[in-house]
Amino acid sequence: MSDLQTQLPTDTWIYTSWEEYEQIVTNLLDEKGKSYYYKGYMRLEMPPVSFDHGQDHVVIIFAVTLFAALKGIQARGLDTTTFRKTGVQDCQPDVAYYLRERAQVIPAGTGIVKLDRYPAPDLVIEIAKTSLLDDLGTKRSLYEELGIAEYWVVDVQNAQIIAYAIADQGSKRIQESQVLPGLAIAILEEALRQSREMSQSEVGTWLLSQFQQKEG
């Protein structure tokens, strides 16, 4: 851990100017932590180290990408990418997806995705092991303001997914994805539960059968 990290509290929101925030994250470029900025406050999160968090991260990416592929939906998934409205908001969600015509909107070679220039992702996913209440609260407000179309919080402890459709800077709970029509949240939750007992390749085979049944 760097000297800077030991001086800054993590997993809490700290009142900070944008200029100070930029300096801090610049100094942390070689670290693997995540950073957020919202309404004049910054938050640093250290890399998750739990087995369950890492496992759920992989399973959810596989499930979404598989579903999109089977449905012929163009999809570009991004892992822990920075999305920024300069001077206003900054975030590094665990997973983000651009779908359909937006799948090619961010050119190769892009570093930080600047939302003053590019659209916000269609789907953002946070994998919550210790940050559940913050992901359901402050971060949800942040994503509402950024104009994300859909937001999922994966509750690692309970193998549950709290999913929201976002419109007009507000959100409502949903049981089926609206950006990926036909994808039931319950199927994804069952995949998470099964991943506790079987290999990810076996979970993938089960997901494939479920998605093909719906196709039929």
Image: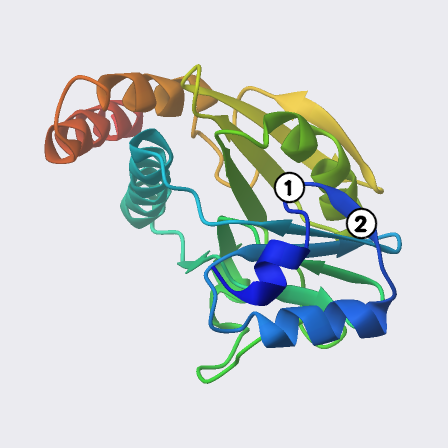
Badge 2: few (under 14), some or many (20 or more) residues near its Cα, within 10 Å? some
Identified at 23% across, 24% down, the residue is 195
Front in this rendered view, residue 75 or 52: 52
The residues bearing labels 1 and 2 have C-alpha atoms spaced at a distance of 9 Å
Identified at 32% across, 23% down, the residue is 192
Q: In the image, is residue 69 above or below residue 112? A: above
Q: In the image, is residue 33 above or below residue 189? A: below
Residue 125: give x, y in percent of width and height. Answer: 52, 41
Q: In the image, is residue 147 above or below residue 152? A: below
> Which structural element holds mark 1?
loop
> Which structural element holds mark 2?
strand
Q: Amino acid at mark 2?
A: Ile
Instruction: Name the colouring of the figure.
Output: rainbow
Residue 177, visible in the rendered structure: no
| The label number, if any, that marks residue 14 in the structure image | 2
| The label number, if any, that marks residue 11 in the structure image | 1
